[in-house]
Amino acid sequence: MKPLDDELRSLFKRREPPEGFAGRVLARLETKPWRSGFTQRASALYRGPVLRWVAVAAAVCVVAVLGVVRNYHQQGKRAQAEQASREAMLALRITRVELDAALERAQHVTVEALIASQKSRKEME
């Protein structure tokens, strides 16, 4: 890593600007056309606190839209859960009715079997 460090130091070593550099920069600034009054005011709007307020307003709008979308999504999930709950309750009611009918049939068969068994005992006696 030593050669890399040396190379970086040499690249970032402070160097004096060439002769006339400051004069050329100042000359370019003087020849650059100034903006019109409207252009200066418009560009000033986007630099100062107005830009911050626009950014804050945009962020608030994004958060509000995301909140509405999330709320809509939650309502859809809630409706699906309620529908599933209703379907489960209906399935439990149907199961209860079927089990009651099966129990009644089983009791009826048991009673018939007991009666038949008692008749056969009496006939054997």
Image (cartoon, rainbow, N blue to C red):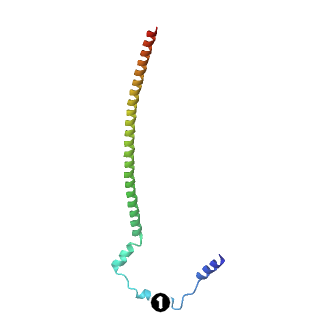
The residue sitting at the top extreme is 125
Residue 47 versus residue 26 in the image, above or below: above
The residue sitting at the right extreme is 2
| Near-viewer residue (113 or 3) | 113
The residue type indicated by label 1 comes to Arg
State the residue at coordinates (40%, 21%): 108
Quadrant in the rendering for residue 46: bottom left
Residue 78 versus residue 40 in the image, above or below: above
Q: Position of residue 57 (x, y in %)?
A: 38, 63
| Near-viewer residue (80 or 92) | 92
State the residue at coordinates (61%, 82%): 10
Q: Position of residue 73 (x, y in %)?
A: 38, 51
According to the picture, the residue beneath numbered tag 1 turns out to be 24
Residue 72 versus residue 18 in the image, above or below: above
Q: Position of residue 122 (x, y in %)?
A: 44, 9
State the residue at coordinates (43%, 86%): 29
